Image (cartoon, rainbow, N blue to C red):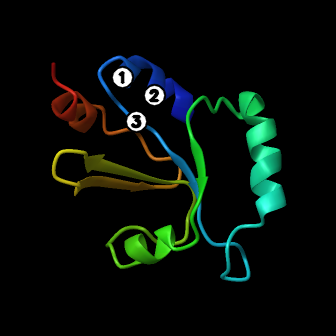
Amino acid sequence: MDVDGVYRPFEHKGLEVLWIFGEGNDGGPYPLGAVEAFVQNAGEYGVTFPVLRDHLFQEVFKVMEGSGDALPIQYILDARTMELRHIAVGNADVAWDILDELLED
């Protein structure tokens, strides 16, 4: 399932999804031109949510178990406490139960 397929069912309950480009292959910021091209073609990728460029983002999460180097990496955070509730590496299944719990009405 694509990211938008997760976002749409929970959007009305307050789910926020961010697509974050971390560091590029050289360890510096991901090339701005590549991020801009991605944003311009976001509809082709099913991206209907904010896209950010933050090369230091990965530094925060590298120390967390399970993050590894595989992409994409899904992080589910509890917005009330900023507690990391779930990490999934690669094209892992979505943690529907955690999303349901965090987004209860």
- The answer to whether residue 64 is above or below residue 52 is below
CA gap, disc 2 to disc 1?
Answer: 6 Å
- Residue found at x 45% / y 28%: 7
- Which residue is denoted by mark 3 in the rendering? 16
Q: Which residue lies under the disc numbered 2?
A: 7
Q: Which mark is nearer the camera, 1 or 3? A: 3
**Residue 79 drawn at (x, y percent):** 24, 45
Q: Which mark is residue 10?
A: 1
- Whether residues under marks 2 and 1 lie with C-beta atoms below 8 angstroms apart, the answer is yes
Q: CA distance from mark 1 to mark 3?
A: 9 Å
8 versus 54 height, above or below: above
Residue nearer the viewer, 104 or 14: 14
Asked if marks 3 and 2 touch (Cβ < 8 Å), the reply is: no
Which quarter of the picture shows residue 99? Answer: top left
In terms of secondary structure, where does tag 1 sit?
helix
The amino acid marked with disc number 3 is Glu
Q: Check disc 3 and report its element: helix, strand or loop.
A: loop
Residue type pointed to by label 1 = Phe
Q: Earlier in the sequence, mark 1 or mark 3?
A: 1
Q: Is residue 66 left or right of residue 104?
A: right
Residue 5 at x, y = what percent? 51, 25
Asked whether 6 or 31 is in front, the reply is 31
